[in-house]
Image: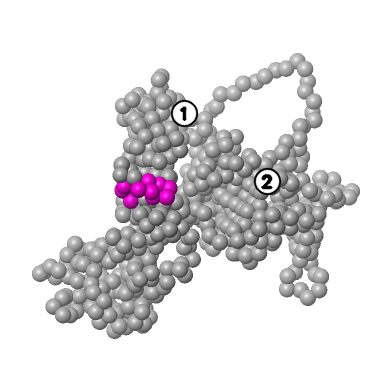
């Protein structure tokens, strides 16, 4: 075996919040002298990659049998575990149940016949990769910088084994560990996270030399293994992906629809996939864009500039004018998006960061919704229900019964605003029949109402008669599963402080940028009388504006 120094580039960029980047780089380069790669003697088609940085850790491929070796962390002596790696479920299909199989589309191709025979020797190619690790994965690895970095470098050793026969060397040119907070939101489906990552990468990573960028994230119960733009690896803008590494077993993981749908283009499915120029959804659904896009072969018509996205003008077949609304706001905590004048597609959906103020600072945003008590009451009981006072809520939720409690527990005084939804009923008639029981309590001239969901159904995943998470329960306090907690203790809290970062004239969005009030311009919300407000992520204030 030989020393493997090729997996880490000497010019690598190492970024760790709260730590010296130079010290981290020096540590990894020093540990770089403990990575080895080679083969097993007298065993054809074998491959071995080992690390001696902290015990013996690695992978052995011996013909058709694979083994893993790693140190026993609980052992008091220098003991290791050697185990066979096999697939116990060889009949497993990674596709979701009932997921449609796309039909193969015939593609044009050319054959080049040359009289001079080329050399069989493959030219050596270097693929430069930059890795970003989210806070959840960093915490899962014990919040140890050296261990997390060593794990990434070890993975690159395994990758290089796979690519070695192709004369391709995969180098780690940049490693960024989000040890303090995530710089983008990792909530939502795979395609949503991928869009946020690509947008962030375009703004903040353009100066780092790389061919591909990957964001590694961790979730307790993932419903996908990753996502990428299929066939777009050579496009610098889309040369990115996200992945959820599983340290136990990937046998039962479900492949995301985002990954699968891009494998073969299917003209007429309404999804633009290479090599399509447009896809307006087939003949029946394509009437309004037929003069822009040919539904038979998904090619643009003559003189058409676009033919698919929300920012394609259906009358002119040209890109919509910059500033045209392409996605309406659905809530005070969900911001409108605009066409940027350069793409036929709307920019990614942007919402307010969790626990940012809304409704004149009387409520907080949570999951893109303003958790206003008046709205919660109206949604539950109807338009004549309003948020009640502390006295009324205290009277109901301190009883510790079906109509007043804190998520089935007795309400401590500090938590009473986080129990059952208690509202004023302002109408003369009683509340119309609902799918829950209603209790009426007369208190100081007001009729207070609360409810009890007797028989939860299969369609009800959460008891909606309780106060929503994220509801304000005091100054700098919010409700979390029936408890009134400090905003500073929120696990997903970002370091974007709207009073400081946004000069007190805006809120932080889920991309950690300011969404400014009308009359103030992003990114720092400086005064500007003609500014409509907004953020650098909404399309209106895109680069070149």
- Residue 98: % across, % down: 47, 49
Q: Is residue 461 above or below residue 299?
A: below
Indicate which label's residue lies in the foreground, 1 or 2.
2
Towards the viewer: 352 or 164? 352
Towards the viewer: 130 or 296? 130
**Which disc number belongs to residue 73?**
none
Q: Is residue 523 magenta?
A: yes
**Which disc number belongs to residue 173?**
2
Q: Is residue 483 above or below residue 527?
A: below
How much space separates mark 1 and mark 2, taking CA atoms? 34 Å
Q: Is residue 402 visible?
A: no
- Residue 462: % across, % down: 37, 67
- Residue 33: % across, % down: 81, 54
Residue bearing mark 1: 277
Left or right of 55, for residue 141: left
Q: Residues within 10 Å of mark 1 (few under 14, many from 20)?
A: some
Left or right of 531, for residue 184: right
State the extent of the magenta-drawn residues as a range: 517-527
Q: Label 1, secondary structure: give it.
A: loop
Q: Main secondary structure of the magenta part?
A: loop
Towards the viewer: 462 or 304? 304
Left or right of 349, for residue 8: right
Q: What residue sits 38% from the left and 80% below the top?
A: 409
Q: What residue sits 56% from the left and 49% below the top?
A: 242
């Amino acid at each position: 075996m030989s020393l493997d120094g090729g997996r880490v580039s000497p010019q690598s960029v190492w970024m760790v919040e709260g730590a010296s980047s130079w010290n981290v780089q020096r540590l990894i380069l020093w540990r770089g002298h403990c990575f080895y790669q080679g083969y097993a003697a007298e065993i054809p088609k074998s491959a071995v990659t080992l690390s001696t940085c902290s015990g013996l850790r690695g992978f052995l491929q011996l013909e058709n049998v694979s083994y893993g070796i790693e140190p026993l962390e609980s052992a008091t002596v220098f003991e290791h575990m050697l185990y066979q790696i096999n697939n116990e479920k060889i009949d497993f299909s990674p596709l979701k149940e009932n997921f449609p199989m796309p039909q193969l589309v015939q593609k044009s191709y050319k054959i080049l016949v040359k009289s001079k025979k080329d050399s069989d020797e493959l030219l050596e190619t270097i693929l430069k990769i930059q890795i970003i690790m989210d806070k959840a994965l960093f915490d899962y690895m014990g919040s140890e910088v050296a261990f997390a970095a060593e794990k990434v470098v070890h993975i690159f050793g395994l990758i290089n084994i796979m690519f070695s026969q192709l004369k391709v060397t995969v180098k780690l040119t940049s490693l960024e560990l989000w040890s303090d907070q995530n710089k983008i939101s990792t909530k939502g489906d795979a395609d949503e996270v991928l869009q946020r990552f690509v947008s962030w990468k375009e703004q903040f990573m353009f100066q780092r030399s790389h061919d591909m960028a990957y964001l590694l994230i961790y979730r307790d119960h993932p419903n996908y293994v990753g996502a990428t733009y299929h066939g777009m690896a050579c496009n610098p803008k889309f040369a990115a992906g996200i992945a959820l590494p599983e340290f136990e077993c990937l046998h039962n993981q479900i492949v995301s629809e985002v990954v699968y749908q891009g494998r073969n283009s299917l003209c007429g499915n309404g999804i633009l996939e290479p090599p399509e120029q447009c896809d307006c959804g087939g003949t029946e659904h394509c009437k309004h864009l037929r003069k822009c896009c040919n539904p038979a072969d998904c090619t643009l018509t003559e003189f058409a500039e676009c033919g698919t996205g929300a920012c394609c003008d259906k009358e002119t077949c040209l890109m919509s004018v910059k500033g045209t609304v392409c996605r309406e706001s659905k809530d005070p905590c969900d911001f409108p998006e605009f066409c940027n004048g350069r793409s036929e597609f709307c920019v990614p959906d942007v919402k307010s960061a969790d626990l940012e103020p809304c409704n004149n600072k009387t409520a907080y945003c949570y999951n893109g919704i303003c958790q206003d008590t008046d709205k919660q009451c109206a949604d539950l009981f109807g338009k004549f229900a309003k948020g009640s006072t502390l006295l009324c809520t205290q009277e109901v939720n301190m009883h510790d019964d079906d109509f007043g409690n804190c998520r089935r527990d007795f309400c401590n005084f500090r938590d009473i605003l986080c129990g059952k939804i208690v509202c004023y009923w302002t109408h003369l008639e009683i509340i119309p029949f609902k799918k829950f029981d209603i209790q009426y309590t007369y208190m100081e001239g007001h009729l207070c109402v609360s409810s009890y969901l007797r028989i939860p159904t299969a369609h009800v995943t959460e008891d909606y008669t309780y106060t929503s998470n994220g509801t304000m329960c005091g100054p700098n306090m919010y409700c979390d599963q029936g408890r009134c907690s400090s905003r500073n203790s929120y696990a997903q809290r970002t370091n974007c402080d709207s009073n400081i970062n946004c000069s007190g004239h805006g809120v932080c969005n889920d991309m950690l940028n300011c969404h400014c009030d009308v009359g103030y311009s992003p990114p720092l919300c400086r005064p500007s009388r003609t500014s409509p407000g907004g953020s650098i992520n909404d399309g209106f204030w895109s680069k070149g504006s």
